[in-house]
Amino acid sequence: MKTFVYIDHFKGDAQPAAWEALGLAKSFGSAIAVVFGSNVDDVIKNAFEYGADEVLLADDSALTDYRAETYASTLTALASSLSPNLILFPTTTRTREFAAMSALDLNSNVITDATGIEVNGDSVVVTRPIYEGKLFEKVTCSGTPQFITIRGRAFPKPEQQVGRSGTITKVEAKTDSLSTVEGYSVAAVGVSLSDAGVIVSGGRGVSNNPSLTPPAGLDDKQAEIWKAQQGFGLITELATTLGGAVGASRAAVDAGYIPYSNQVGQTGKVVAPDLYIACGISGAIQHLAGIRSAKMVVAINKDSDAPIFKQARYGVVGDLFQIVPALNAAFKKKLGK
Amino acid sequence: MKFIACIKQVPDSEAKVKAEGGAVSWGDAPLVINPFDEYAVEGALQQREATNGSVTALCIGPESAREALKHALAMGADEAILVSDPALNELDTVGAARVLAAAIQKIGGVDMVLFGRQTLDTGSGVTAAQTARVLGWSMLGLVGQIKVEERSVQVERVIEEGRQSVKANLPAVLSVVQSIGEPRYPSFMGIRKAGKATIPVWSLSDLGITAPAPLVTRSELLNPPAREMTIEIITGDSPTAIAETLVEKILAEKVL
């Protein structure tokens, strides 16, 4: 199996799931990493250290900024001349798009969000979640090459072998773009939900702290949001202690407490952390589907009948505004922070 | 300017979806317009207002998918077209892209096609990009803000790292995300208009194409593994006592 692994990165920071894809490729034989863009020395160094046997580099200023057409055409040209059987990608906003376009160019198709891959000779069967994680399907693609984007944290991350290196082969970039990138406003994002080992999430309940008095001059809605932000402050402190990410239920997002990018489940992100701590989240069916792959769920809720307790390993029926800070202190003590 | 919003009909997100006898079952849950696609309709309506243009809602699906198109009409779309053909039961994303592209060409004179971010059912989120590729038009994914100019469009794309600002030629295909703005509710007048509207149905022969054979096929449908869930409720004399017990239990299971 000749496997390419596309190493997705933003300004030289690689997506962690790219290393998971490299590890997966190695389990089928050898792995050839594909890197696009300029100033990518660190990406290449890490690709070798995470197991790449060779790096194909399209180093061209036309690829510095991601644009769907240039990336798709560069990959299409590369795949038609080198004929890999399989191209793996970490699932990101970029790869989902240009892998799909390049697959179409080559009379193949893409399979996204893989959580399992079985390779038997030439046959590749992919398991992926559908209906927001309520079901899984096994699918195969009859085209060649196979384009598969893998979900973050679904496959083990290989050990980094410091100092390992290999051959870099330059490949041609295609520059047929229909668009121009004018700039970025880069948000201060912490750990992303898809890559997080720990997620601490808040629901509508985070705005209900009776002991808080909002500053004067706020109307009811502003006061509610102010209270919710104090609540999410506690959640963020706990997430920081655990090196994790902050999540939220749809109810909390719809109420304007926290941006959509933090939403877990249903119309948000499907996540797979080792530990998921749900604070003041009742547990709508869509939210529960989104956290199904979490290894352990801990629920803190005032209402002992909340559906979230049905999916939790441990539960605390109580006031999150007391429990969450106490939990933060207890973790700090135990983890020596 | 001429805008098209591509929509799909899916089981409501509240549905208890199960695998039954190798098929997907959603019980008696209603079929609705894919919630992400309401943002595509909303985005198209905003641009129609900004450019004095028109909005066509386009859908591939069975006869019952008329209801999803009626929702788009009730929101304010000017017209709706259903592409329906018994040969389209086994479409994959490439197939859907080829059929949509043929319909978009048949409509003619289109400046911008808008999609939702993904569908709630099989949810690949790739049909917009593949449709753009078939048409040879600019692809702008995950757009949160649109500004149409003479023969170009300037957008803000929402990506993992923040926002990317991009300018592209028209015609273009966009997929839109929630920050485009909350979808408007159908108005009373809109619902009445939608009720009376005739929705043309186009078959594959109307489009002059044959059914694209699926490249991706499903061999198995699985319910998620049932979880043996025994919950343990942690109690204690004080929040501190509860927290300390809980932390010990979590650490003992070595998930961290």
Image (spheres, coloured by chain):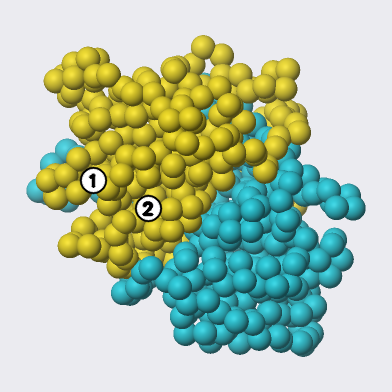
Chain colours: A cyan, B yellow
Count the labels in the image.
2
- Which dot marks residue B2? 1
Residue B1 lies, in percent from the top left, at 19, 49
Query: Observer-nearest residue: B80 or A218?
Result: B80
The reply to whether residue A296 is in sight is no
Q: Earlier in the sequence, mark 2 or mark 1?
A: 1
Q: Amino acid at mark 2?
A: Val
Task: Characterize the local packing of mark 1: few (<14), some (14-19) or many (20 or more) Cα atoms within 10 angstroms.
Answer: many
Q: Chain of mark 2?
A: B
Q: In this image, B44 relative to B224: left or right? A: left
* Element type at mark 1: strand
Q: Chain of mark 1?
A: B
Quarter holding residue A255: top left
- Judge whether A81 appears above or below B207 on screen: below
Residue appearing at x 26%, y 44% in the figure: B3
Tell me the CA gap for discs 2 and 1.
12 Å
Residue appearing at x 37%, y 53% in the figure: B173
* Element type at mark 2: strand
Residue at numbered disc 2: B173
Task: Characterize the local packing of mark 2: few (<14), some (14-19) or many (20 or more) Cα atoms within 10 angstroms.
Answer: many
